[in-house]
Image: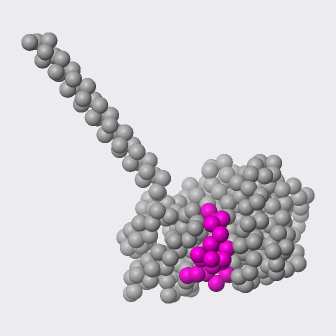
Amino acid sequence: MFGYHRHRQEIKMASDLFLAALLISVASLAGLAAGARAGGIAIYWGQNGNEGTLAQTCASGNYKFVNVAFLYTFGKGQAPLLNLAGHCDPATSGSCTFVGADVRSCQRLGIKVLLSIGGGVGSYGLSSRADARLVARYLWENYLGGTSASRPLGDAVLDGVDFDIESGGSAHWDDLARELKKYSGKGREHKKVYLAAAPQCPFPDASLGGLGGALGTGLFDYVWVQFYNNPPCQYTTDSGVGNLARAWEQWTAIPARQVFLGLPAALEAAGTGFVETTDLVSKVLPVVKKSKKYGGIMLWSRFYDGKTGYSDKVKPSL
């Protein structure tokens, strides 16, 4: 009888241990799943000499992506021009190679660094598929895995290209995306070429499209939609989250890997569209995080984020 009870106790103990191990495993998997869904922050750097260095930006620990802004002149036979505001003068040979060293510093931290092309002020556009091919070749040779002797940021290999196309028409951006993707896995480091885009929130975007156009190609990994300077699809305290939610639903239907909510990091960073951090956390994030394509938020810009600490305040809630 004693042996029988001991046997039952051993079975019960084994069963309890198994159940405990199973619960721990389930909790761990749930934690991993939550971590996988946790959003990151993309930031624009390069347009204010008082925003700190690129290395300092990445060392803050707040960002998953940094867009170096902007290559503001290119295409249609124009000599490409990079503007990094007060940081350095790309037109002077060797002036910006320290930025390349910072790129590598960021990448060692696991942060993807992309070159942002276009911007709100610039002279750019594409006249043909052949023109798109030429621009892609230039970007590859000078900023990605190519070997041009005149690389503005030295030998650093950026992770990809961000399309911040706010003028220059809508033609051939899809061709540029296709040409750039052809370089994935090539070059001395065999790196993937990531593509990102920053369309305006009215759907579809006037330059990059939505379900059609460049963004309909399925080639874009990250799309950070600008939900500012566009009142019809912004959040406001008066109208609430409805307009933003309707636009968000449209944007998350495009064939992109992840979609981000683009916001100004300070009231003065944009004409309209600033969302207080408390409203973002309590009212906006619960809506946008429902999408499986939710990737996090994008902020304009590092300079303003440094002033307000916006990313510090919202990062735990992303």
At 66% across and 77% down in the image, what residue appears? 213
List x then y, in percent, for residue 246: 45, 80
Look at the image and tell me in which quarter the N terminus lies: top left
Name the image quarter holding residue 27. top left
Q: Residue furthest left?
A: 1
Rendering coords of residue 162 (x, y %):
68, 68
Image side of residue 27 versus residue 221, left or right: left
Give x and y (percent) for residue 306: 57, 67
Question: Image quadrant of residue 113?
Answer: bottom right
Residue at image location 89% in from the left, 61% down from the top = 150
Q: Is residue 134 magenta?
A: no
Q: Quadrant of residue 134?
A: bottom right
When the figure is inspected, residue 138 is found, relative to residue 165, above or below; the finding is above
For the record, the magenta segment spans 203-222
Q: Is residue 36 visible?
A: yes
Q: Residue at x 26, y 25 (%)?
A: 14
Magenta run includes residue 206 = yes
| 225 or 129: nearer the viewer | 129
| Colour convention of the picture | one colour
Specify the quadrant that holds the C terminus: bottom left
Residue 2 in the image: x percent, y percent?
A: 10, 12
* Image: 233 above or below 189: below
Does any portion of residue 199 appear in the rendered image?
Answer: no
Task: Decide whether the magenta segment is chiefly helix, strand or loop.
Answer: loop
